[in-house]
Image (cartoon, coloured by chain):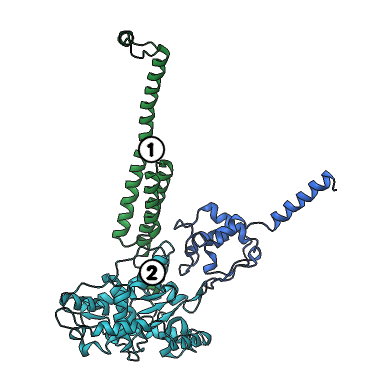
Chain colours: A cyan, B blue, C green
Amino acid sequence: MLRKLLFLSVMMLAAVRPALAADLADPKAEFKAFRDYFTSRFPKVPLDDFVNGPYSMDEGLRKQWQEIEEFPPYEFAVDKGKEMFAKPFANGKTYADCFPNGGIGIRQNYPYFDTKSGQVITLELALNQCREQNGEKPFSYTKDDMAALTAYMAFTSRGKRFDIKIPDDPRALAAYRKGEEYFYTRRGQLNFSCASCHVQSAGNHIRTEVLAPALGIMAAMPIYRSEWSGMGTTSRRFTSCNSQVRATPLPPQDELYRDVEYFLTYMGNGLPVSGPGARP
Amino acid sequence: MISTSAGIAIVALLALATAVSAAPSAGEKLAFDRGKGNCLTCHEIKGGDSPGNLGPPLADMKARFPNRADLVAIISDETKRNPRTVMPPFARNHILTDREIDAIVDFLYTR
Amino acid sequence: MHLPSSVARMTAATSGIWRPRMSVLRALSGLLLISVLAAVAMAAPADDFKAAYAKAEAASKQSAALKTQWTTTVATLKAAKAAADAGKFDEAVTLAKEAEVLAEASIAQGRDEQGAWKDRVIR
């Protein structure tokens, strides 16, 4: 009798076991779940508005964003970027020669998974590859010249909908998963994951700073941050976020950072390019 | 002309007055220090400016946490009680010493 | 202290040069003994620091290789070295040991976090 009971209870437990951690959905399903999470949590925010980050979180903040857009602090960077983009390299070639459509209106396709080299290519990486292929020195990834170029390229792409693809290649899926893992993993002495702030605490504020929702968080890059009194790229933001939770940052454009950008931008598919952006 | 004893009394009263409206306690200093407790980043606490709201306001602490050990545990490692918490584990990750946590708890019990 | 006869003969032989009195010679050799002992004693904390720092640095490097290093570990190691360079060996050893504790805690964090992300993915 006891053995029968034992057998029955084991079978019942097996039937009602909680979903195993290994049960991850495919990226398409995860994309939908991610978007639904934020739209149901912030029902008053129009979908496209999520790209304005903290400024999307309430009416007062949205008004602030509109005011900033009248005299945008990133304007100087766009102008500088336009000049830089047009100037030929020493060998006579230009940036336009390296990119589809001459590099105009293409921001929404980055980053992409390059099956040839088996890695995620971000816009910044592609720009430096273009420079090096044409005998020029690469730029630092975090600010200044690089941020000016990407500010201009984002500006020419404003309004275009992000369209990040995951090709049918196990390495592409692996890159997505690595980025996803990084996003949800706690790090630093302060024990925060990216999700701690940008999923769980989205819309709340640390001191006076409202935390942006992760949905569409890449759409406004590069950004002018008042805190930096200047422009910064995705690399600048990733490295500074790491330091802020007391985690030693990875090198800018490290493969793992590019995987994170790949995952996050994919999650924002369908949302419009809003860069370059302004943030507190 | 005041007498010596009156003078002494006045000085004593002044000293007491200064002590009462005095410099913040060790616990308050630790709680508000960005490099230590940094509590205001996430919590509203009376006496602190520009608080965040990732966590609940820290008020009525004596009523809410009659058992001191519970409050110490939360600050030391809240992931034990709530694995999804965004509260840093101040003891487990050696952000604060046990003595510092005790001082902060003393301070919180005045809020 | 009884001086060897050779020293006594040397002092007697040096005429015209300042010939230190016995008491002075005794004092000088005492001082020499103390300095030697002190030098031996001072070498120990410096060695203690070297050992503590080596351990902490190894743990810090391991945490960096695992990509779980904390900025505070690096800063504490740096402070330990600065204290040692300033001759403050007790402080330096304390800081080095603290850095090791931080490095180990960051490695433990990485270990605990392995696989934990899967439960957190938005579904």
**Residue A230 visible to the viewer:** yes
* Residue at 30% over, 60% down: C66
Q: Does residue B29 appear left or right of residue C104 in this picture?
A: right
Q: Nearer the viewer, residue A11 or C81?
A: C81
- The single residue placed furthest to the front in the displayed view is C16
Instruction: Give the x, y percent position of residue A88.
Output: 19, 82
| Kind of element beneath mark 1 | helix
Q: Quadrant of residue B23?
A: bottom right
Disc 1: CA contacts within 10 A as few (<14), some (14-19) or many (>=20): some
**How far is mark 1 from mark 2, CA to CA?**
38 Å
Marks 1 and 2 belong to one chain: no
* Residue at 38% over, 38% down: C45
Residue C31, placed above or below residue B58: above
Q: Does residue A117 appear left or right of residue B18 in this picture?
A: left
Q: Which residue is the site of mark 1? A: C45
Q: Does residue A127 appear left or right of residue A186 in this picture?
A: left
Instruction: Give the x, y percent position of residue C60.
Output: 33, 54
Chain letter, disc 1 residue: C
Chain letter, disc 2 residue: A
Q: Which residue is the site of mark 2? A: A240
The disc at residue C68 is none
Q: Which three-letter amino acid code belongs to the residue tagged 1?
A: Pro
Q: Quadrant of residue A21?
A: bottom left
Q: Which three-letter amino acid code belongs to the residue tagged 2?
A: Ser
| Kind of element beneath mark 2 | helix
Q: Nearer the viewer, residue A129 or A49?
A: A129
Q: Does residue A4 appear left or right of residue A169 in this picture?
A: right
